[in-house]
Image: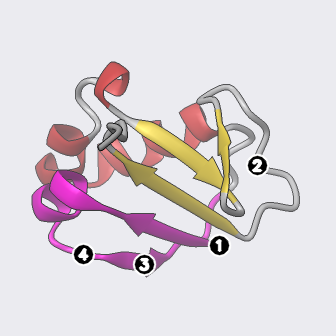
Amino acid sequence: MDVLYFAWVRERIGLPRERVETGAATVADLVSELSAREDRYAAAFADLSALRVALDQELSDFDAPLAGVREVAFFPPMTGG
């Protein structure tokens, strides 16, 4: 699946996107896998309350299943303007 990173998440990880092979069942499982990779991932995912996630461009929750998902995007909360 494609994993996309936006704003400060991208800055901490150092990539705008990457292709990930995973056996993760949920978004939270994927976050655990990514966080275990390197310190930069652990830093980006240290505070999940400061992150939002979208699955195939639909806002979702961290306990959402990943079955059939092609794209996961992580980004900070959006503000109105």
Tag 4–tag 2 contact (CB < 8 Å)? no
User: Is residue 76 or residue 62 the one in the foreground?
Assistant: 76
Which residue extends farthest right?
68
What element does badge 2 sit on? loop
Residue 63 quadrant:
top right
Find disc 2 in the rendering and name its residue: 66
Find disc 1 in the rendering and name its residue: 1
Q: CA distance from mark 1 to mark 4?
A: 15 Å
Disc 4 packing (10 Å; few <14; some 14–19; many ≥20): few
* Residue sitting at x 44%, y 68%: 4
Find disc 4 in the rendering and name its residue: 15
Identify which amino acid the numbered label 3 is placed on.
Glu
Tag 4–tag 3 contact (CB < 8 Å)? yes
| Rendered location of residue 27, percent (x, y) | 61, 40
Q: Is residue 4 magenta?
A: yes
Tag shown at residue 18: 3
Does residue 35 appear to the left or right of 1 in the view shown?
Answer: left
Q: CA distance from mark 3 to mark 1?
A: 8 Å
Region in magenta: 1-22
Identify which amino acid the numbered label 4 is placed on.
Leu
Q: Earlier in the sequence, mark 1 or mark 4?
A: 1
Tag 1–tag 2 contact (CB < 8 Å)? yes
* Residue sitting at x 29%, y 37%: 45
